[in-house]
Image (cartoon, rainbow, N blue to C red):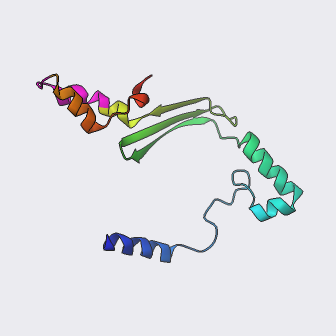
Amino acid sequence: MRQSAAIVRQCLDRMPKGPVNIADPKIVPPPKPLVRQSMEALIHHFLLYSQGFTVPPGEAYVPIESPKGEIGFYVVSDGSNTPYRIRVRPPSLLNLQALPRMVEGRMVADVVAVIGSIDIVLGEIDR
């Protein structure tokens, strides 16, 4: 724990000062003080939050490590401000697919214990 805390402190000390978000005004809302002073900033803020921003056409799959395993997001864009298709691959689905190999040769009563040990969320796999 001490070593982890030292690494975090070292990262914070080396982090550059100033804002950390992108400087593209089409994606990032204007600063709050500017929204309260400028009509253009207020309009930009309103349009960004009500309509969003346009994404170039294409597709992307991004896996993210979560506490229960890998969760994946597949997004297809047609060039508008709303996605054409979104597909989420929950970690419980992958864990459930491994269940037959885990219980092979075991008793039926062991299935409940195995499901509890891999912590499947049935709401994620109910399609």
Q: Is residue 69 left or right of residue 34?
A: left
The residue located at (72%, 55%) in the rendering is: 29
Q: Is residue 71 magenta?
A: no
Q: Residue furthest right?
A: 39
Q: Is residue 78 left or right of residue 70?
A: right
The residue located at (75%, 58%) in the rendering is: 30
Q: Which quadrant of the figure contains the C terminus?
A: top left
Q: Position of residue 118 (x, y in %)?
A: 27, 37
Image position of 115 with respect to 38: above or below: above
Res. 36 image quadrant: bottom right
Q: Position of residue 120 (x, y in %)?
A: 33, 33
Res. 50 image quadrant: top right
Q: Is residue 101 magenta?
A: yes
Res. 116 image quadrant: top left
Q: Position of residue 78 (x, y in %)?
A: 65, 31
Decide which of 122, 7 is in the foreground and name it. 122
Decide which of 59, 3 is in the foreground and name it. 3
Image position of 46 with respect to 92: above or below: below
Q: Which residues are magenta?
A: 96-107
Image position of 53 with respect to 28: above or below: above
Q: Which quadrant of the figure contains the N terminus?
A: bottom left
Q: How many marks?
A: 0
Q: Position of residue 104 (x, y in %)?
A: 15, 25
The residue located at (48%, 33%) in the rendering is: 88
Q: Is residue 18 left or right of residue 126?
A: right
Image position of 45 with respect to 76: above or below: below
The residue located at (37%, 75%) in the rendering is: 6
